[in-house]
Amino acid sequence: MQLPPGLASLSERLSQIGFERTRRALAGLALSIFVSLYLLVSLNAPDGFGRVFLALSASYAVAFVGVVAEWFWGRWFATGLAWSGVMIAVAAMVILGWEPQLAIFGGMHLLVILSLMGKKMAARYDFQEAWRTRYKMDEFGVARLQKAVTSAAAALPSLIITALAPKEDGLTALGGLAATLLVLAGLRGLTRVRSWGVLAIGGAGAMLGGTMAVSSLFGIGYDPMRALAMAEHPSVLTPVFGMVGAPLAFVFLAAAVVPFARDIARFLRRPV
């Protein structure tokens, strides 16, 4: 993802500041809070939403382990989840107005982004010599892979909501579930630097886009806010997840494939 000028400037400053271990600890702390929060909410969630929060908790647990263990893709995956959280918080406050809970929710995700910014943090993850030598990755290849993993990870929370939140029709649920499984497979492929990972991400985007088109064409819809309003014990954070879904996920999935679009087009145009 291209950073806004202000964040890019802050990233450069963080590169000079250092304190990589401290910033890694801050990012891990914020991620662990979300793991615990979603896990606890899943135990007392509105009907049908327990599996949503449980899956979100698992996603943040993967990000936490990736960051703490300093896996080369850990910073990318955690940053993608964090960007998703920031965008959800901003969109929710635009619609609902100022809510302290939403501000804290977005601020903690922003803390993850800022903590993992900078060239010195990248040196601990992206530029580890072992994996780059193993997969023969140059600077350009690393940058493309970073954008793909970050964007696909950012789509994951919205896909989980689309796939697992209760719905009146099965088409959206089936399409969302299939797209989610493809994204998980695609992320695994990307972290193993396999071409089929990009194809899986692209397939997930195509499937999600097709599902949205068919749902719109036949008037099949799902109103998550209605489902949340009918819930017995909706929490303050719950409406946030009712405002995002397939459209946001589709945008992120498209962004994940864009870095490889030229290579895909060249492959398709090759002589048989």
Image (tube, helix red, strand yellow):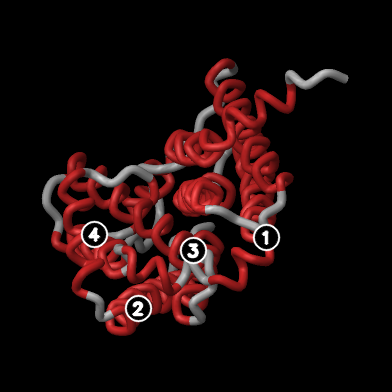
- Find numbered disc 3 in the image and state the secondary structure of the residue it sits on: helix
Alpha carbon distance from label 1 to label 3 = 30 Å
User: Based on the displayed image, in which of its 4 quarters is residue 267 positioned?
Assistant: top right
Q: Nearer the viewer, mark 3 or mark 2?
A: 2
Image-based side of 62 in relation to 122, left or right: right
Which of pointers 4 and 1 lies earlier in the amino acid sequence? 4
Q: Is residue 169 above or below residue 66?
A: above
Please indicate, yes or no, whether residue 234 appears anywhere in the rendered image: yes
- Name which residue type carries label 3: Leu
Name the residue that disc number 2 marks: 24
Name the residue that disc number 3 marks: 56
Residue drawn at the location 30% of the way across and 63% of the way down? 117
Residue drawn at the location 53% of the way across and 68% of the way down? 72
Which of pointers 3 and 2 lies earlier in the amino acid sequence? 2
Q: Nearer the viewer, mark 4 or mark 3?
A: 4
Name the residue that disc number 4 marks: 11
As rendered, which of 237 and 189 lies closer to the eye?
A: 189
Alpha carbon distance from label 4 to label 1 = 27 Å
Are circles 4 and 2 on residues that touch, CB within 8 Å? no
Alpha carbon distance from label 2 to label 1 = 25 Å
The residue carrying pointer 3 sits among few (fewer than 14), some (14 to 19) or many (20 or more) residues within 10 Å by Cα, namely many
Name the residue that disc number 1 marks: 135
As rendered, which of 58 and 237 lies closer to the eye?
A: 58
Residue 207 position, x and y percent, is: 65, 33
Image-based side of 8 in relation to 60, left or right: left
Which of pointers 4 and 3 lies earlier in the amino acid sequence? 4
Q: Nearer the viewer, mark 4 or mark 2?
A: 4
Image-based side of 57 in relation to 242, left or right: right
Which of pointers 1 and 3 lies earlier in the amino acid sequence? 3
